[in-house]
Image (cartoon, rainbow, N blue to C red):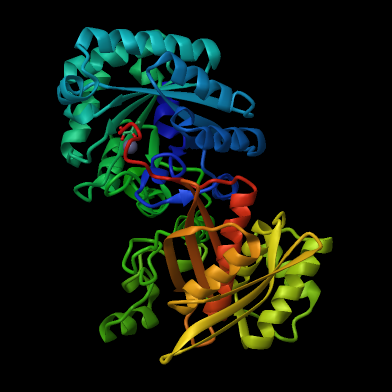
Amino acid sequence: MTPTERRTAPIVFFDTTLRDGEQSPGISLNREDKLEIAQQLVRLGVDVIEAGFPATSPGDFESVQAIARQVKGAVICALARCVESDIHTCWEAIREAEHPRIHVFVSTSDVHLQHQIKKTREEVIEMARESVRLAVSLCPGDVEFSAMDATRSDWDFLAAVIRVALEEGATTINVPDTVGYTLPSEYATLLDHLFANTPGLDKAVLSVHCHNDLGLAVANSLAAVQHGATQVEVAVNGLGERAGNAALEEVAMALVTRQDLIGRRCNIVTTEIARTSRMVSNLTGYLVQNNKAVVGKNAFAHESGIHQDGVLKERSTYEIMHAKDIGLTDSDIVLGKHSGRHALKSRLAELGFLLDGVELDEAFRRFKELADKKKTITTLDLEAVVSEEMRSRLDLYSMVHFYVSSGSAIIPTSQVEVVREDEHLQGKAFSGGSVESIFQAIDDAVGISGKLLDYRVRSITSGKDALGEVRVVVEVDGHTYAGQAVAIDVMEASAKAYVRALNNVAQGHEASMARPERVF
Ligand code: KIV
Ligand code: ZN
């Protein structure tokens, strides 16, 4: 990278939602969920997708491999410890990608060396040397090296490790604030020190990866960009270990909104931000807090009279960004009962769903069904229903009918009919709560018994006729599977979500839950 490119090239967005983000407690994504998120990250304009950490489990390996094979238009990266077998596994998972990247890491702080990896500084230098050398031999031209806990490391030792990684051919050097400890001014000084003391660093991509333990991840990432960083590692909705990583949408909108001061561009298509945030929230089950910057429900709402008055007179009095810049539309009402197939097709295309033939017929059928129950169908409703339809395309089981009776003085009774290929399976149950009884009736019909680990309901829009979305996580034979569905009736959404989870059981689409025994 020449000095001019360093100053003018777009900041590289490296998204780690599917790796560090997926380490958030309770997240359970299966391979199809991850593929769907990865495809959306490409539409969002992300440059590098960190798809996972293949050595941690066969499920992670398969998800990374599927992304590497199917997702085009971004670099597909995967993580490996500075351990020979991890690096080979990582390469096997990503080797078929259009643009693969191996990302190796080792800790450099004394506290990690003494208490966690039990290595001397000399041993760490050798691990970095051998691992980068091996990674470069497998994936020449795109290897990233991370010095874990860099911000709590001895600065000269850190520079020495980075020097070795550069000598061996690493093309990106990442200086993570692993525990979210540093402050913007300190981080900036550290990067200045590294540039001054590490020959060749100015030719590499300098990356930063900030955790949010003190709520400074975005501020630290921006300070780093102002001090020469050319890649930011971020996650959608700020997901990640503990308090999370720097939020992709916040870093991107700060670069766009404060272009005057920072003067750096990026390839993020900001109008895809709201949709990506909703998709990640839906699939991970992690709700976005109302007052979250950029993507929170209230980010563009004005409550006080003075603010409303100002915005009505001139939007810029109290708004520094426009809702439409992140893809929120002014008019939420899109279609009604009388809209035809053609109107639906073009509205869906605007939302990024290019449907035809059977898929469009099915979406139209769902749309009509919904329009009979709900006066106006919003963008959010359409997105929820069509995404669900696409996800259930290959399902083995589908629910044709359910019945549940409940009340304050009776034991709930449920009956369900589930179809598997041409076979109609009936099930019934009488038990505790109505949701429990539906799930037991489904178990009875399908012959699989799931232990419910998580159950969440939320409404897609406001209003009494809003679509309800249910997400369940079930355990079967020690493995976890997730399912999600939408319907106006929450009981119906619950039943369908549970059937979806059992489909994932039948198809072996395990959802990886964040596991404490994972490395860091
Ligand atoms: O937080 C961290 O240091 C990491 C590294 C693996 C980059 O996630
Ligand atoms: Zn991290």
The quarter of the rendered structure image containing the N terminus is top left
Compared to residue 188, the image places residue 397 above or below, namely: below
Residue 349 visible in the snapshot: yes
Viewer-closest of 410 and 399? 410
Q: Which residue is drawn at 27% across and 83% down?
A: 304
**Horizontal side of residue 283 vs 204, given as left or right:** right
Extreme right residue here? 357
**Horizontal side of residue 181 vs 502, given as left or right:** left
Viewer-closest of 251 and 493? 493
| Quadrant position of residue 161 | top left
The quarter of the rendered structure image containing the C terminus is top left
Name the spot of residue 372 as percent of width and height, x first.
Answer: 69, 87
| Quadrant position of residue 182 | top left
| Quadrant position of residue 96 | top right
Name the spot of residue 299 as percent of width and height, x first.
Answer: 36, 68
Q: Which residue is drawn at 24% across and 16% down?
A: 159
Viewer-closest of 263 and 186? 186
